[in-house]
Image (cartoon, helix red, strand yellow):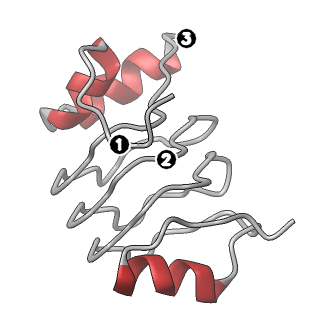
Amino acid sequence: MSSQPQIKKDKMYQLLREGKIKEFNECKAEGQKCDLSQCDFRAVDLTGMDASGLNMSGCYFRLADLRGIDFTRTRLDGASIHDAKVSGAYFPKEFSSDEITMSLVRGTRMRLNC
């Protein structure tokens, strides 16, 4: 698996990149699967996305709009949220506040506290 963020051809990923959050959520609710690991979400507005149960490990969220997203049931290990908008977002309890802050401010990849 590459450590560099990727722009994939996956339909579900493309819906998110195109800002079609409602359509993404509908497809997800209908059972369509997607693996969003290692994806590039640089400067993408994801507000309103249902992130529950998704694998978003290793994703790159620099300058992305993540406001209000509940990531508590999302796999985010190795993701970077550098300069993202995170107001009102919920992160998995396995990430310390320091880990989240370092990723937000310095661009480090978030590591699980296990």
Q: Nearer the viewer, mark 1 or mark 2?
A: 1
**Residue 61, quarter of picture:** bottom left
Determine the CA span between mark 3 and mark 2: 23 Å
**Residue 36, quarter of picture:** top left
Eyeballing the image, is 34 above or below 87?
Answer: above
Residue 92, percent from left and from top:
68, 63
- The residue pinned by badge 2 equals 58
Q: Kindly tell me whether residue 14 is visible in this rendering.
A: yes
Nearer the N terminus, badge 3 or badge 1? 1
Residue at image location 19% in from the left, 31% down from the top: 20
Nearer the N terminus, badge 1 or badge 2? 1
Q: Nearer the viewer, mark 3 or mark 1?
A: 1
Assess whether mark 1 and mark 3 are in contact (beta carbons under 8 angstroms).
no
Eyeballing the image, is 109 above or below 101?
Answer: above
Eyeballing the image, is 37 above or below 9?
Answer: below
In the image, what residue type sits under mark 3?
Gly
Label 1 Cα neighbours within 10 Å, binned few <14 / some 14-19 / many ≥20 = few
Determine the CA span between mark 1 and mark 2: 8 Å
- The residue pinned by badge 1 equals 4
Residue at image location 26% in from the left, 36% down from the top: 21
In the image, what residue type sits under mark 1?
Gln
| Tag 3 secondary structure | loop
Q: Quadrant of the C terminus?
A: bottom right
Determine the CA span between mark 3 and mark 1: 28 Å
